[in-house]
Image: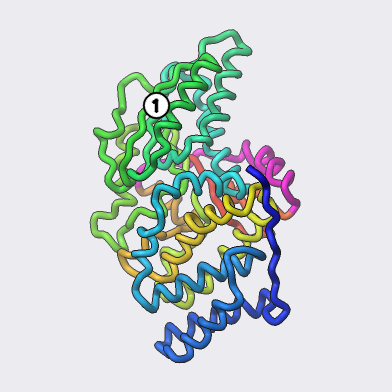
Amino acid sequence: MEEEEEEEVCSPDFPPGDIKQLLSDCAAALSENKMDDFDRLIEKASGVVLDTGEPIHRLGAYVVQGLKARKLGTGIAIYYGLDSIMVPKSKQILNDICPCIKYGLLAACGVIAKEMLTEERIHIIDFQIGMGKQWMHCLRWVASWFATRNRDAPHVRITGIDIPENEGLEEVARQFAAISVECKIPIEFEGVRVHGQAVTLNMLNVRPGESLFVNFPMLLRCLPDESVDVNNPRDRLLRMVKSLSPKLVTLVEEQSGTNRITDFLNRFDYTLDYYLPFFESIRISQARNIRDRLDADKHCLGRDIVNIIACEGKERVVRQELHFEWKSRFTSAGFRQYSLRSFQSEIKGHLRSYSPHYNVIEMYGTLLLSWKSRILISASAWH
């Protein structure tokens, strides 16, 4: 595919700081039910934001969409109305062009790969497998490790869970089959099309004699918790996984605390402050054409931003939490933390190869990946 030049747009009449203030003024007018002011301001904002160009413009385009949807009450329709078939592919693009996500996932898969070296039969359950790319490198590395020692690689069974609309699971199965032949590592793959909160024990097909590993890659943030559902699917799933006695569970999540921010204006300002560096970090690192990047923006970041801004109650699907809040949930479910400190140096090296503005710190065993001191992603492991 031919690369396209991305046009950087920056209106001299609206420098980034002024655009951010204009968006905040729109939110304030909407919050105070000053609809004439809101309509005037949102029209002005619509004229200076767009989904191409500089990060503030791209972010602003989805913020404006979210504010309009909040006024009209159409936020949840937009969230579910976007082409769900595109979501897994778009998430894979985002994983590739956002180093903080990419290497947060690498840390999770890496610690599982390390633990696989002492096992003969392995079952991996990935609760949002997408296109499965995160496991390809992992399995090649494991196969190579055993081959250089003239030892047989372990038997690996992978249960890949994803949304029912993911039409790519057959392709994922073909890729695993190809790696199995290429690397001489026995791999079984089963795709399960189901939403995370609807997963039952029977769907996981856990078998005796296998060492179980579970990966939660940015899934739990979209499961309802106790604040919106008395059944608390978020904690219920953690307790169910704990009942299976996994050897290791990994978690990769956005380091954002929107779940607990009930006041709209506070959540709005927090969302702007969190996502602007996200868009900045993608601009610096991207190596794809505009169309791929736009798909990732629209079906992943933009979709989430609109939901966070436009929706309340059960309709607010995206409910991110900070690493210490996840720690509380995992601890309450009976897990103990497994430190990822040994991966910090390697992950930092990968991030710095893109830009010195990327960094990773380790805090009580959790890796926190950042752009210009703003932590974007957390990666942790539990047993």
Q: Is residue 170 visible in this depiction of the protein?
A: yes
Where is residue 9? Give x, y as percent.
Answer: 69, 68
- How busy is the neighbourhood of tag 1: few (under 14 within 10 Å), some, or many (20 plus)? many
* Region of the chain picked out in magenta, as a range: 333-356
Horizontal arrangement in the rendering, residue 173 relative to residue 8 (left or right): left
Q: Which residue is mark 1?
A: 189
Q: Name the outermost residue toward the front.
A: 2
Q: Residue at x 61, y 76 (%)?
A: 48
Where is residue 69? Give x, y as percent.
Answer: 40, 73
Q: Residue at x 38, y 64 (%)?
A: 78
- Which image quarter is the N terminus in? top right
Where is residue 369? Give x, y as percent.
Answer: 61, 50
Q: Is residue 359 visible in this depiction of the protein?
A: no
Q: Is 272 inside the magenta-drawn segment? A: no
Where is residue 40? Give x, y as percent.
Answer: 51, 88
Instruction: Name above or below for residue 305 compared with residue 68.
Output: above
Q: Name the outermost residue toward the top.
A: 150
Q: Residue at x 52, y 35 (%)?
A: 133
The foreground one among 137 and 300 is 300
Q: Is 337 inside the magenta-drawn segment? A: yes
Picture quadrant of residue 314: bottom left
Instruction: Name above or below for residue 36 compared with residue 126.
Output: below
What's the colour scheme?
A: rainbow
Horizontal arrangement in the rendering, residue 33 relative to residue 343 (left or right): left
Q: Residue at x 49, y 40 (%)?
A: 381
